[in-house]
Image (cartoon, helix red, strand yellow):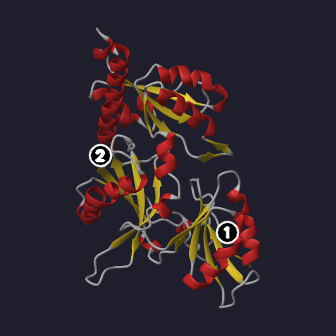
C-alpha cells in the first residue's frame, strides 16, 4: 500500500499527564469524534499533552496527517505558549492543524469582538491596548454608556470577565461602582472605580489588553452557542447561564444560582434558522474577509456564543456576539462530530497531497 493509500492519521490532543497511557478512545469525552473518523476510514490518535513532554508530543504529531486540539488558553496557571509553538512547527512541516495558533489570534481571542464590531453581530465595543489608555478613557466611557462588560484578551471559564456599573451619577476615579466577576461563585462587590481599575492592571501584562463591550440586558434569557464546522452550522446549545447575573438571596452556592443545562439542538432546529442563515450566508464570510481567514483555515470545530440583543420592531430576536471559542470546544452536540470529522479529514488529505507534491518537485 502506498503512503497515499494508507488511512489518514489524525491526532486528537488534550492536556493531561503524558506519562499515563490515554484511555481507550471510546472512553474519552471525544468518543464520537474518534468514531466519526473511523467511520470515514481515518484513524484517530489520542495524544495527551504536557509542557514537560513537548518532544514526546512532537514525535507523535509529526507521525500524523492532521491535528485537532482541545487545550484551553488558561488552565490552572498554565498557558498554551509551548503548545502553540509546537503546533506552528508541526504545521510548517506539512501537518494539518486545527485550530492553527495564528488563526486563534485572529478569531479566537476576545479582540475579535472589536475587530468585527461593524458586522451585524456587533454592538458598542471598545479596545484598550495599554494601561495608560484604559486609565484615560474607561471612566468617561462608563459614565456615558452605562453598564459595561470588560474582558481580558485571552481566557476561558469567565476568568478576567467583569460587569461594571456606576453607582450614582458622579464620574471620576473616586466614583462608587458595583462589579461582578464571571467566575462561578462570584458575588457583586462595591469599590471605587480607581480601585477596581487597579485590579485590571494585570490584564495588560505581555501582549495583554482589555476589550470593553456594552452589557446586554437580555442576558438572563440565556446564551446560544452556535457550533460550526468550517463555515457550516453543525448544531446549537442553548443555556440559561448565571455568569454576570447576581446570585439569588440563597447565595452563590445555592441550586438556584447554578447554570441550567445546555440543551443541544441540530442545525435544522426551527428556533435558530434566522441565526443559521446569518452565520452561513453573511456573518462568517464577512468575518473571514475582515480578519483575513480563508475557508481552509477555518477550524474543523468552533463555536460562536451569542446573547440576545434588542428585539426588532416586529418582535424578532437579534443576536450579539459574546465570544468565539476555537481552542477547546466541548461539549458539543452529537450532530457536530461527523461534520468536524469530515472537515478534519479534508484538511489532512489536502496536507498529505501537498507534502507528496513537494517530494515529487
The answer to which quarter of the image holds residue 204 is bottom right
Q: Is 129 on the left or on the right of 310, as rendered?
A: right
Q: Quick one: 63 or 113, which is closer to the camera?
A: 113
Residue pointed to by mark 1: 133
Disc 2 or 1, which lies upstream in sequence? 1
Question: Badge 2: how crowded within 10 Å, few (<14), some, or many (20+)?
Answer: some
SS class of the residue under badge 2? loop
SS class of the residue under badge 1? helix
* x and y, in percent, of residue 38 in the image: 31, 27
- Residue shown at 43% from the left, 53% from the top: 291
- Residue shown at 31% from the left, 27% from the top: 349
The answer to which quarter of the image holds residue 285 is bottom left
Residue pointed to by mark 2: 335
* Residue positioned most to the top: 1
* x and y, in percent, of residue 307 in the image: 42, 68
* x and y, in percent, of residue 165 in the image: 62, 79
Q: Quick one: 49 or 279, which is closer to the camera?
A: 279
Examine the rendering and report whether any part of residue 98 can be seen.
yes
Amino acid at each position: 500500500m502506498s503512503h497515499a493509500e494508507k488511512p489518514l492519521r489524525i491526532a486528537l490532543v488534550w492536556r493531561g499527564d503524558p506519562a499515563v497511557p490515554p484511555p481507550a478512545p471510546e472512553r474519552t469525552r471525544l468518543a464520537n469524534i474518534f468514531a466519526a473518523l473511523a467511520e470515514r476510514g481515518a484513524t484517530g490518535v489520542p495524544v495527551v499533552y504536557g509542557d514537560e513532554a513537548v518532544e514526546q508530543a512532537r514525535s507523535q504529531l509529526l507521525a500524523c496527517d492532521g491535528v485537532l486540539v482541545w487545550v484551553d488558553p488558561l488552565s490552572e496557571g498554565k498557558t498554551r505558549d509551548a503548545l502553540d509553538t509546537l503546533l506552528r512547527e508541526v504545521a510548517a512541516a506539512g501537518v494539518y492543524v486545527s485550530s492553527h495558533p495564528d488563526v486563534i489570534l485572529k478569531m479566537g481571542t476576545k479582540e475579535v469582538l472589536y475587530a468585527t464590531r461593524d458586522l451585524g453581530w456587533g454592538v458598542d465595543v471598545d479596545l484598550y491596548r495599554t494601561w495608560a489608555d484604559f486609565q484615560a478613557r474607561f471612566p468617561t466611557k462608563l459614565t456615558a454608556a452605562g453598564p459595561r462588560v470588560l474582558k481580558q484578551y485571552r481566557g476561558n471559564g469567565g476568568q478576567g470577565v467583569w460587569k461594571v456599573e456606576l453607582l450614582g451619577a458622579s464620574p471620576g476615579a473616586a466614583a462608587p461602582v458595583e462589579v461582578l466577576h464571571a467566575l462561578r461563585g462570584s458575588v457583586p462587590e462595591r469599590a471605587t472605580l480607581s480601585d477596581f481599575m487597579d485590579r485590571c492592571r494585570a490584564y495588560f501584562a505581555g501582549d495583554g489588553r482589555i476589550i470593553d463591550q456594552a452589557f446586554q440586558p437580555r442576558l438572563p434569557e440565556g446564551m446560544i452557542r452556535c457550533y460550526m464546522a468550517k463555515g457550516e452550522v453543525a448544531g446549537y446549545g442553548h443555556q440559561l447561564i448565571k455568569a454576570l447575573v447576581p446570585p439569588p438571596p440563597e447565595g452563590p452556592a445555592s441550586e438556584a444560582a447554578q447554570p441550567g443545562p445546555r440543551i443541544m439542538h441540530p442545525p435544522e432546529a426551527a428556533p435558530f434558522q434566522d441565526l443559521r442563515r446569518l452565520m452561513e450566508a453573511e456573518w462568517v464570510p464577512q468575518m473571514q474577509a475582515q480578519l483575513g481567514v480563508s475557508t481552509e483555515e477555518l477550524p474543523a470545530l468552533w463555536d460562536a456564543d451569542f446573547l440576545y440583543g434588542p428585539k426588532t420592531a416586529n418582535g424578532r430576536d437579534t443576536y450579539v456576539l459574546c465570544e468565539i471559542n476555537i481552542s477547546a470546544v466541548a461539549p458539543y452536540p452529537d450532530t457536530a462530530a461527523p461534520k468536524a470529522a469530515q472537515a478534519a479529514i479534508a484538511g489532512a488529505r489536502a496536507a498529505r497531497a501537498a507534502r507528496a507534491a513537494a517530494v515529487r518537485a
